[in-house]
Amino acid sequence: MKSMSSLSNLFIPTPLFRQHHTPFPTQKPRRDAILCSQGNLDINGQLKLSDFQLAKTPITPIQFRGRTVYIKRDDLLNFAGIKGSKLRKFYSLFKQNEDIDYDCLVSYGGSQSNAMLALAYLCKYYRKRFLYITRPTPERLSSSPGNLREALGVGMEHVQVSLETFRACFTDAPREIRKTACSVLRNAGYDVPSAKFLFVPQGGAWTGAELGIRVLASEVCDQIHILRRQGLLAPRKPILFIPSGTGTTAFYLQKHLHPHAQVVTVPVSGDERYLIKQMRWLDSYDSDEKEQKMKTTMFPDILRPRLRSTFADVRPEKLAIWKELSRSTGGDFEFDLVYAPKTWEEVMLAIDEGRLGSRGEDLIYYHSGGAEGNVSMLDRFARAGIR
Ligand SMILES: *Cc1c(COP(=O)(O)O)cnc(C)c1O
């Protein structure tokens, strides 16, 4: 049995959050709260990340359309520029950095990607070279505010290849992608010793994400049990809803939360077929083969989107639900304008239509972060005349 004081620490971790004895913080948690050190500094006085643990992020309740929704606040995660759920996904790179011998990290994907920016900061932190491959990108993107400019500012090398090459090399066959990336770089004139580079697939959709998300799952699991003991959650399985880009976070979260919560995810950057493909691919890589033979992994429920929309689109309904969400937090924290509105729109519609939560299940939303991008999104809404 855990003592009561360690229980309240699950909500407001020390030393990064001030200690409280109420279940929820009433004051704003510090925005820089992130990793708590076990104390060690290396020779240069740098914090050694292998000695770090991710600080537990709080769960905050809000009232939305007459019901309580619990928000898992991973938007508060921020270490050395790596923010939100990306810190969970790349946690293994911190934990294992001393064991992996690499000079250079290679990845590819969209030119304003959050994963790209997180990896750029990680490489800055460890003083590694970072090569990032994209399709041809308009020149102005590298000089206007956004993830690309920021990543270039912290030393990322941007490798642009033709649209044909990009499509041909990076659309399918994920198992061959590492080799492909290597030859793409060689053809583009980069000298990349194949043994010494670490490859991370687009969006951090890789098995290395499991470690950090397993930590997240055990944290959420503890918090569910505490909320239940406090009479705040009903004894039945709650629904945890979460936006998906590549589906990696949702996949591993369900794998490790089962049977304590049902994960429901909304495809935001692709459709449900893309998500199923991604998840099957991750599942096929399951490292522990014995475990794999014993039981099949639980997949999250994927909500098939009912509303027409595209990734990062600018629609009046999106801004409207975002404003409604902002009001529900009383200005204490922000939701992002890319993943959150679409997810809440679809989940609320599914609830209204009785496709979801018809047994009165409690709702938990996984807040993955991303609100840093709101400035440029709000600008796009304003320019489209949407207020
Ligand atoms: C990357 C990202 C996601 C998507 O995560 P996946 O694991 O790719 O599904 C969601 N929200 C934010 C803010 C992100 O940066």
Image: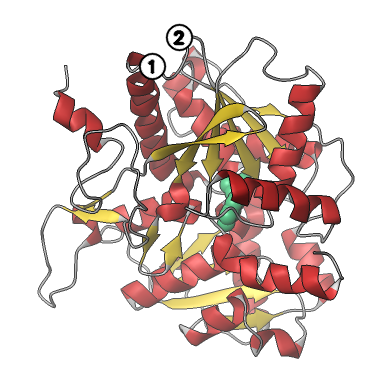
User: Would you say residue 245 is visible in this rendering?
Assistant: no
**From mark 1 to mark 2, how far is it between C-alphas?**
7 Å
* Residue 235 circle label: 2
Looking at the rendered structure, the secondary structure element under dot 2 is loop
Please provide percent x and percent y for residue 370: 57, 59
Q: Position of residue 254 (x, y in %)?
A: 53, 28
Task: State left or right for residue 218 relative to residue 353.
Answer: left
Which percent across, then down, holds residue 161?
A: 74, 79
Image quarter of the C terminus: bottom right
x, y percent for residue 315: 84, 57
Q: Label 1, on which residue?
A: 228
The residue shown at (86%, 35%) is 306
Question: What amino acid does circle 2 point to?
Answer: Pro
Left or right? Give the position of 108 relative to 7: right
Which quadrant of the view contains residue 26? Answer: top left
Tell me the amino acid under the disc marked 1: Arg
Q: Is residue 65 above or below residue 101?
A: above
Q: Badge 1: how crowded within 10 Å, few (<14), some, or many (20+)?
A: some
Dot 1 and dot 2 residues touching (CB under 8 Å): yes
Q: Which of the pair 193/64 is nearer the observer?
A: 64
Could you tell me which quadrant the N terminus lies in? top left
Q: Nearer the viewer, residue 356 or 151?
A: 356
Residue beneath the point at 27% across and 33% down: 22
